[in-house]
Image (cartoon, rainbow, N blue to C red):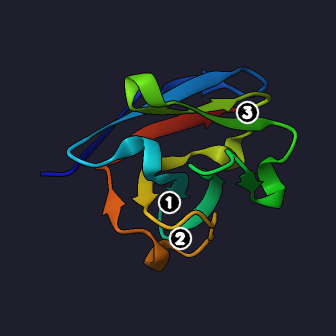
Amino acid sequence: QVQLVESGGGLVQAGNSLRISCIGSGLPFSHMTMAWFRQAPEKEREFVAAISWLDRKTNYVDAVKGRFTISRDNAKNTVYLQMNSLEPGDTAIYYCAARRPTTTLTSPAEYSYWGQGTQVAVSS
């Protein structure tokens, strides 16, 4: 059974940093492209960042470039999202997702596996 479990969310003030994590089990983690999506209240789920398993190539939505960094530790079956200079607009539930192909696509429909999400709230 595939499981993706996110952790590390919380409430932070604008300008501060937070690192969220996602541990995978029941899947060949080292051969899975991993991604983070987020969904704010009454908004559609949107792509945030992804990292390929083949060459660790990364992809980011423009809104987080230069502030967020996605990384992975295959030995720990874990993907991270380091979020710096957080803004109130970053407030959302953050979801971890996985797909087998190597391309870091941005559509939620391209990802086969999902976690339950972790809440990130940024106060002004």
Q: Position of residue 37 (x, y in %)?
A: 53, 57
Quarter of the image where one finds residue 4: top left
Mark-to-mark CA distance, 3 and 1: 16 Å
Quarter of the image where one finds residue 77: top left
Q: Report crowding for label 2: few under 14, some 14 to 19, many 20 or more residues within 10 A (C-alpha).
A: few
Q: Position of residue 18 (x, y in %)?
A: 61, 23
Say what amino acid the circle numbered 2 marks.
Lys
**Would you say the residues marked 1 and 2 are in contact, meaning their CB atoms lie under 8 Å apart?**
yes
Judged from the image, the secondary structure of the residue bearing numbered disc 2 is: loop
Q: Position of residue 9 (x, y in %)?
A: 45, 29
Say what amino acid the circle numbered 1 marks.
Gln
Position of residue 116 relative to residue 113, above or below, is: above
Q: Position of residue 61 (x, y in %)?
A: 75, 59
Q: Which mark is residue 86?
A: 3
Query: Would you name the residue on which mark 2 appears?
Result: 43
Mark-to-mark CA distance, 1 and 2: 6 Å
Residue at figure coordinates x 73%, y 50% from the top left:
57
Residue at figure coordinates x 51%, y 67% from the top left:
101
Q: Which mark is residue 85?
A: none
Query: Would you name the residue on which mark 1 appears?
Result: 39
Judged from the image, the secondary structure of the residue bearing numbered disc 1 is: strand
In the picture, the quarter occupied by the C terminus is top right
Q: Report crowding for label 1: few under 14, some 14 to 19, many 20 or more residues within 10 A (C-alpha).
A: some
Judged from the image, the secondary structure of the residue bearing numbered disc 3 is: loop
